[in-house]
């Protein structure tokens, strides 16, 4: 039998203990024979030396995780025991592999701005990624979502777009509503298909682990422990953007992507993307990343085409 005191320094103990000590209770549940008393910044342990050593390791892992995440929950404690190395995935400096594609190819940030977006994801719960076509905003967002799902950081991925046609009319397309919308949402399917095997992707979609739907379907929902991506957000008005952002539930990550130069609304001034960013970007937990033409990662011609149309 032994005794030990762990002192939490340079961090508010409440951030580790959780609301009403929920995180600490979850951790103690894994050590039924260990006596644990929390007094301010001190955690006093009494029990078997092996349990004390293990408990200390887990507390240090939680502290490390908190430095790379806005808020800890009992799910984080659960993850510590599902994979002892799980905290390593939070040590993300922006240029590491996000996820491996179906062909084994590593998917990672390809330039400095993408690295900033990845870094912002781990430090905030709402991220705006705005810039021209071809900069990889949506692709990186989906890679981050797939990574979070595979690592059990979230329970589901929800991808959505406003149903605004780029010069076309969905009503003239054949089939029911899903058939009409599927071609419009195809870029999201394509990105997912690069990262999740086809059969597994179908299973995820059938069971609701991955959902792809038009923005209007988000109304009235509360999205807990999910990674939620709003794509083509320049085609939302301010009211729609507010509706989407207020769907955020506990342990959720929201990513909003868009290109302010490609607004398909009848009145371009109705776009709420840039207005929404200005209203919320100074809130703690919100980050805005702006891509430029120099960040385009598609065919080299794309950058020149974008510049030509800007002129």
Image (cartoon, rainbow, N blue to C red):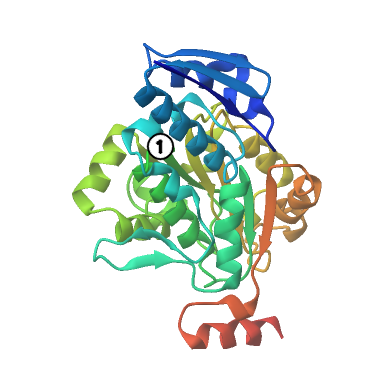
Q: Residue furthest left?
A: 199
Q: How far from the left and from the top, in percent, is residue 262?
A: 63, 66
Who is closer to the viewer here, 122 or 138? Answer: 122
Residue 177 visible in this rendered orientation of the protein: no
Circle 1 packing at 10 Å, graded few (<14), some (14-19), many (20+), is many
Q: How far from the left and from the top, in percent, is residue 195?
A: 32, 57
Compared across the picture, whether 235 is left or right of 239 comes to left
* Image quadrant in which the C terminus is located: bottom right
What is the quadrant of residue 39 in the picture?
Answer: top right
Q: Residue at x 48, y 38 (%)?
A: 61
Compared across the picture, whether 76 is left or right of 113 comes to left
* Image quadrant in which the N terminus is located: top left
Who is closer to the viewer here, 80 or 53? Answer: 53
Q: Which residue is mark 1?
A: 156
Q: Residue at x 45, y 21 (%)?
A: 27
Q: Residue furthest front?
A: 1
Query: Tag 1's secondary structure?
Result: strand
Residue 106 visible in this rendered orientation of the protein: yes
What is the quadrant of residue 77 in the picture?
Answer: top left
Who is closer to the viewer here, 211 or 3? Answer: 3
């Amino acid at each position: 039998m032994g005794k030990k005191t762990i002192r939490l320094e340079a961090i508010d103990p409440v951030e580790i203990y959780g609301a009403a000590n929920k995180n600490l209770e979850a951790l103690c549940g894994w050590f039924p024979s260990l006596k644990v008393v929390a007094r301010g910044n001190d955690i006093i342990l009494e029990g078997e030396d092996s349990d004390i050593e293990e408990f200390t390791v887990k507390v240090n892992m939680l502290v490390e995780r908190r430095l790379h995440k806005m808020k800890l929950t009992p799910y984080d404690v659960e993850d510590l025991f599902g994979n002892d190395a799980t905290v390593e995935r939070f040590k993300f400096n922006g240029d590491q592999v996000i996820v491996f594609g179906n062909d084994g190819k590593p998917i990672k940030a390809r330039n400095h701005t993408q690295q900033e977006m990845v870094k912002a994801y781990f430090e905030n719960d709402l991220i705006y990624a705005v810039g021209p076509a071809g900069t990889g905003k949506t692709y990186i967002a989906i890679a981050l979502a797939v990574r979070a799902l595979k690592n059990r950081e979230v329970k589901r991925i929800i991808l959505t777009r406003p149903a605004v046609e780029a010069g076309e009319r969905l009503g003239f397309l054949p089939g029911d509503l899903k058939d009409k919308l599927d071609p419009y949402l195809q870029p999201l399917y394509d990105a997912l298909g690069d990262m999740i095997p086809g059969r597994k992707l179908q299973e995820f979609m059938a069971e609701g682990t991955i959902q792809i739907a038009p923005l209007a379907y988000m109304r009235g929902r509360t999205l807990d422990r999910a990674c939620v991506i709003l794509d083509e957000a320049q085609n939302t008005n301010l009211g729609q953007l507010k509706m989407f952002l207020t769907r955020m539930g506990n342990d959720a990550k929201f990513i909003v992507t868009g290109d302010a130069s490609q607004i398909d609304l009848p009145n371009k001034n109705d776009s709420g993307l840039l207005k929404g960013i200005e209203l919320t970007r100074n809130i703690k937990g919100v980050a805005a990343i702006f891509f430029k033409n120099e960040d385009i990662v598609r065919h080299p011609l794309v950058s020149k085409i974008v510049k030509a149309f800007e002129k």
